[in-house]
Amino acid sequence: IILVVMTSLIILTIALSNLSRWMMIGRPSEVQPKPLKATFPGLIVIASIVQQGVKSAAQVAIEHHWNEGKGNLQHCWIICGGSKSLEHSLSIVKQMQGQVELVKSNPMEFKLTDPHDSQRQLRISLRNLEPAKADDPNETFKLVNQIYEEAAREAIEASNLIADYTGGTKSMTAGVVLACANPERHLEFMKPDGYTEEGRADLSKDAIATDVKINFQLKAAKPPR
């Protein structure tokens, strides 16, 4: 009888512990999105194609964290979804204030030096997905995880890296959010500073970097037999 009682208590304790953990994992964060004042050493953005004269969300996000060389940004990864998106990303790099040069003659890697302080540098890496892959959330999910691994090799911890899910295709956005669902990873989006009468974002105004907290731990499902 004693053995049965002790075994039952152990099973009940384990069950309650797992239930508590499951409830904590599945519960969304109660922290509401708010303007992001901090700047991060690492930034992941998704490039978008916008009309001439309008800043994309990716460009505004980079400018926020670079802050004309006063921010903490050291390495930025721009995820592109095809040739047009890649072309726009290159234009963002050219518009940045400072001396821009290729890194190791790689057309996808750039180094930006602050014109006022040669010791302050920003490395910009372009990652291009073919159009078919840009419509697959799994591809962006894998790419973002690869970037986190690359950031770790660059001595940028996950806590010092933030991903912006505003631009790109909806599938690319989904991939970024899935990759950063873990509460240890930071997320942001560029919130419009105003809206038109039709309810669309007012592109004449710069968007505001907004901190987003989510609290999930996702696990890949087993492939069907």
Image (cartoon, grey):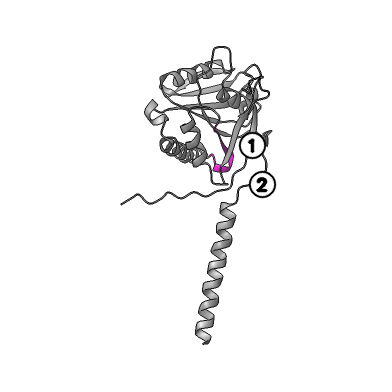
Residue denoted by label 2 = 30
Single out the residue that lies furthest toward the bottom: 1
Task: Look at discs 2 and 1 and give the one toward the viewer.
Answer: 2
Identify residue type, mark 2.
Answer: Glu
Figure label count = 2
Q: Tell which of 199 and 7 is nearer to you.
A: 199
The quadrant in which residue 99 appears is: top right
Residue denoted by label 1 = 211
Sequence-first disc among 2 and 1: 2
Residue at figure coordinates x 53%, y 17% from the top left: 50
* Percent x, y of residue 55: 58, 18
Q: Secondary structure at mark 2?
A: loop
Single out the residue that lies furthest toward the left: 225
Residue at figure coordinates x 66%, y 22% from the top left: 195
Q: Tell which of 156 and 159 is nearer to you.
A: 159
Magenta-colored stretch includes residue 98: no
Residue at figure coordinates x 68%, y 24% from the top left: 193
Is mark 2 in CB contact (under 8 Å) with mark 1? no
Identify residue type, mark 1.
Answer: Asp
* Percent x, y of residue 161: 56, 38
Badge 1 density bin: few <14, some 14–19, many ≥20, Cα 10 Å: many
Question: On screen, 169 above or below 96?
Answer: below
Q: Secondary structure at mark 1?
A: strand
Magenta-colored stretch includes residue 164: yes
Q: Which residues are magenta?
A: 156-165
* Percent x, y of residue 92: 53, 19
Q: Tell which of 39 and 164 is nearer to you.
A: 164
Badge 2 density bin: few <14, some 14–19, many ≥20, Cα 10 Å: few
Residue at figure coordinates x 50%, y 25% from the top left: 47
